[in-house]
Amino acid sequence: MPIQILPPQLANQIAAGEVVERPASVVKELVENALDAGASQIDIDIEKGGARLIRIRDNGCGIAQQELTLALSRHATSKISSLDDLEQILSLGFRGEALASISSVARLSLTSRPASQETAWQANAEGRDMQVQLRPAAHPVGSTVEVLDLFFNTPARRKFLRTEKTEFFHIDELIKRLALSRFDVGWTLSHNGQPVRRLKAASTPAQQLQRVASLCGRRFADSACWIENQHQQLKLWGWLLPPAAIERQQGCQYSYVNGRMMRDKLLNHAIRQAYGEHLSAEQQPVFVLYLELPATEVDVNVHPAKHEVRFHQARLVHDFVASALGNALSQLQPEALRASQN
Ligand code: ADP
Ligand code: MG
């Protein structure tokens, strides 16, 4: 076969392989866009586990009509413009790939209105060349992205979709994690027309704890110890469950680095180490923890889905987290430290 440049749709479908694994990954990308747009309210409607419909509506800054076509193109982003920017990322997105990738494997429409425009416009990209069609639409300030029939044109991927229930479980789990990353944002989630979650924006500590209780369980909110610790430019805060309150079934294990949700080995190791021998082999730590450090101290461009980060001073971060949590646990009463027998 001669060497040839792939048509845009196919190139985007290949890129989609990295980030669009299942409906929940689409939801993650779209919600992160809404958060980057400064939304204070995000409404998510799902049908058939996301295989039929994923609709995300936000009241963020919107996209101007003349930028809608670009928004759907690959490598188009408003979030970085130089390598310097890449080294100190404050936004959740920066790769300029999500909308292009998703629209190559589903029927995507993007409807948006910035405050400066009287009307909204809707954009779709279709076919091999991903030609963008624009038409006027009705929409308040903000954006709605609708994703229909995910993987309709990539049967190999579609085959990997699990049951509606399983896919929705992953979406709900994701929304819990995201809702805990931004207490100041209001959220709704519905599945097949039924409301599943409604979280009002939480500003006071009591309202925040209320959100923690509704997402991680009343038991967690009642028994967790509050963590707040700072060492030079490193800051750690959140909630950690004392060993005695940990049950066999797994609870929340949510960690965030500069507001970004993570599954980070180094943090997990530090947390486990803090519990030390108070945790039996079959028990898992339960926590909602937020690590904050200067953006220049972490590299977020490690993984396309951004599940991992690289810390420039990994040892320092690890030891800070382990000792901050270890100290908090060591101040508990002996009863709270005893590994539970249930
Ligand atoms: P990235 O988030 O990496 O920049 P995306 O493909 O996710 O790439 O989005 C491309 C661009 O479209 C973004 O940089 C942003 O300017 C714009 N955009 C996407 N979603 C929204 C939204 N919900 N509100 C406002 N702008 C958006
Ligand atoms: Mg994005």
Image: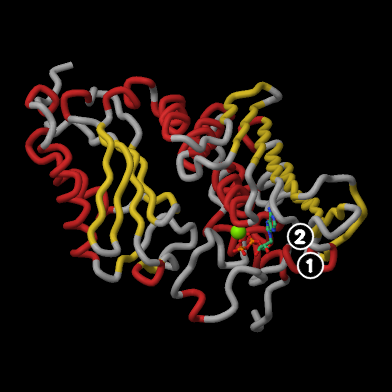
Marks 1/2 in contact by CB < 8 Å: the verdict is yes
The front one of 330 and 99 is 330
Quarter of the figure that contains the C terminus: top left
Q: Is mark 1 within 8 Å of ligand 1?
A: yes
Measuring from the top left, give residue 297's x and y in whole percent: 34, 69
Image vertical order of residue 192 relative to residue 34, above or below: above
Residue plotted at (24% across, 65% down):
314
The crowd level at tag 2 (other Cα within 10 Å; few <14, some 14-19, many 20+) is many
Residue 99 location, x and y as percent? 67, 58
Where does label 2 land, which residue? 63
Q: Is residue 172 left or right of residue 332?
A: right
The residue sitting at 79% across, 57% down in the picture is: 114
Looking at the picture, tell me which residue is in the foreground, 149 or 239.
239
Q: Identify the residue shown where x is 46% and y is 39%.
A: 180
Instruction: Give amino acid for label 1.
Output: Glu
Q: Residue furthest front?
A: 204
**Image position of 6 (left or right of 312):** right
Ligand 1: quadrant of the figure: bottom right
Disc 1 and disc 2: Cα gap in Å?
6 Å
Q: Nearer the viewer, residue 48 or 154?
A: 48
Asked whether mark 2 lies closer than 8 Å to ligand 1, one says yes
Quarter of the image where one finds residue 19 = bottom right
* SS class, disc 2: loop
**Which numbered dot is residue 67?**
1
Instruction: Locate residue 147 relative to residue 198 in the image: left or right.
Output: right
Residue depicted at x 56% and y 61%? 93
Q: Amino acid at mark 2?
A: Ile
Q: Is residue 326 above or below residue 7?
A: above
Q: Secondary structure at mark 1?
A: helix
User: Residue 198's image quarter?
Assistant: top right
